[in-house]
Amino acid sequence: MAAALSRALKLPGKKGSDLGEYDPLTQADSDESEEDDLVLNYPRNGLGRDSCLGSGSIKLHKSERLVGEARDDDEEEDDDDEWMQRLPGKSRRDRGEPKDGQLWSHRDLSRERMGEELRGAGTSGGAGLGVHNADAEKKRIRARNVVRSMFFLVPLACATLLVLMCAFLIPCQKAELEKKLQWEKALGDAADPTPPALALWDVDGDAIEDVLVAVTEWTNETHTAQRNKNYSMVAVSALSGQVLWRKVMRESVTYIQCGLRYSEQPSTVCLLIAKSILMAINGTTGKRLWMVQLKDIESQAVLLPNIDSDRVPDLLIATLPDDKFIDLSLTLISGLSGTVLGRPVPFNLTGQGKLIGPLLHETQQGAFYILFGLGNVQAISLQDIYFRAFGDMAMTQALRRKDTMWEGLKKNNLSSFIRIYRGSEHVEFLLPLVANWGNNHNSLDTVANLNSTRSNWVLVYGASTLSVLRQKDLRKEWTFTSASIHSQPALGHFNKDNVLDLFVQHSANGIMQAQIVDGSNGSLLWRADFVCPRLVLETSTIFTSTGQSAFLFWASEPIKAPRNATKTTRAPGIAAARPLIRKLFLLHPAFPTVLLELNSTTETAVTSAVSYQERLKDATYITVSSRPTPDSEPAARVVRSMSLKAAVSRGQIVRLAGSNKEEASSKPATFELNTFFRRLYFKRQV
């Protein structure tokens, strides 16, 4: 009480208009709590120029305030904290701090406080609205953050899921598909020693080439005890080995060709060619579309440009009776209806040997010629064939063209034939120099036949001479002489000069020799000797991811002894008692001293083909084999499908004998070979 009274006595005793005469003693006699509150809060009321005190009391007021603050630091600090909490947004001027030597008056602060109280009392809902707006703003910010997080997390989750699918699900699906591609199916009997007709084409629309094969079966008659032959044509699914459809035939089918298309027929059309029947069927169902009967059909069908204006390519068939003195005939057939167009065109051929062709060739000037022969090769323009078949009937614009260079090769103006090859040695093989001709030459697809009708030719004559003929002037590019060639050359890329090389093989004295000849100059690129497998089977080639081809061929054990070593003889009966094991080898040009053994069997493979699987970057190797059966029953005919990618992964490495010390010292390591073949994949040659 005394401290409060002493502080009050020091205050100026001015008389104001509103407060009246200030009496410190009267103030001291009042209630203690009121005195303490008044005295303690009085300096904070900020009496200034607008109060009852005059301007001359400003300095006194400031000095008394400093004294009060010095005495009660703790109370002032608490009060200042409370003041700052009440007005957090006030500036220094609003807090009543001195600026420019002046202070805010008590009246100004009172007015400001009254305005805030009036605003608070008058708009009691405004505070709630402000809080609501703040909460809504926080919710909007929170929602915006959630949306941003979702925009980031959802694509991340999708990408993670896609990576997991690619890493686990897709390889599993490919592995399951590779398992489905490996199957075998017994179809009929090996009653005929000649190889059965075989073709690969997608007939069920699953983008995988199916197997079409001719089947012969023996049937026992219960009443007469006679055995008859039943002939049929069977389509087998490449994925499961199940029979899709079966077409019963009156004769054994010798050729199967697919790829012909009609505008009103969405599915592909296949041709079944027998000795006296040419039949077109629906490739999806096996239903017959049309049939024409001819005699002594000797060749496949040749796809021609449309000559009867029905927008469907037409066909040409060669017929040759067993009596060689009767003329060979070329017959034109409508590809849409099977109707024979015009008259058969006969030719008096004096040569001997096997029938060559017929093949269609388009020259650089756009003229069409048919190549054929009997022991030799000659050509005749398609225009001349049309004229002989129809007489003076109008022909299409494509048939009116003739090549001046080719026409100049005729012997005289009276002859219609152009000599391609004629010599004392008979022609064994004539085929276009295009990739995959050996595996897809039975196709009737227009695009597939485009390159083959404009290329050079591979010519094998005299059973041991190999040449390449240039189509522009019919001259020999080069000539290679070897031992007797027993099978049709296989075409593939062994080196990297972008020119097709030729794989040939011949057998003599129990030894089979495989050779690869350079397609650009006829030099020898590779050679190896094997024990003769005693079978004649065409070599297959497959284009790989390295830009080169892999060569697939059948042989027995490779001979590693030097070539000039003395051959050992076996006692009679030992070789006959021991079954001959035939092996399927893969040769890749990256490692010419190494072979990969894919399969081994005692069965006799009679024909084979390669089917490409674009989705898997894989290929299947299709073989038709004769499997021995007990007792006196005929051997069973077995069709087998093998995934080459799976076969390569489990194949056995076979090293060939090096011809010199450098080759022996540079043998690739097993780890390097396994890594290479594991990363190798196959693709279609374009």
Image: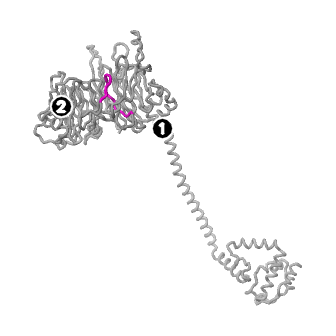
| Amino acid beneath label 1 | Pro
Asked which colour scheme the image uses, the reply is one colour
Residue found farthest to the right: 2
In magenta segment, residue 291: no
Q: Look at the numbered disc 2 and give the secondary structure of its residue.
A: strand
Magenta span of residues: 479-494
Judging by the rendered image, the residue that carries numbered circle 2 is 330
Quarter of the image that includes the C terminus: top left
Task: Give how far across and how far down residue 602 sits, in percent.
Answer: 40, 19
Image quadrant in which you'd find residue 289? top left
- Of the residues shown, which amino acid type is indicated by label 2? Leu
Q: From what the image shows, is residue 571 above or below residue 160?
A: above
Q: Would residue 491 be counted in the magenta stretch?
A: yes
Of residues 178 and 39, the one drawn nearer to the viewer in this rendering? 178
Which residue is found at the position 76% from the left and 80% from the top? 45
Residue at mark 1: 171
Q: Residue at x 40, y 17 (%)?
A: 580
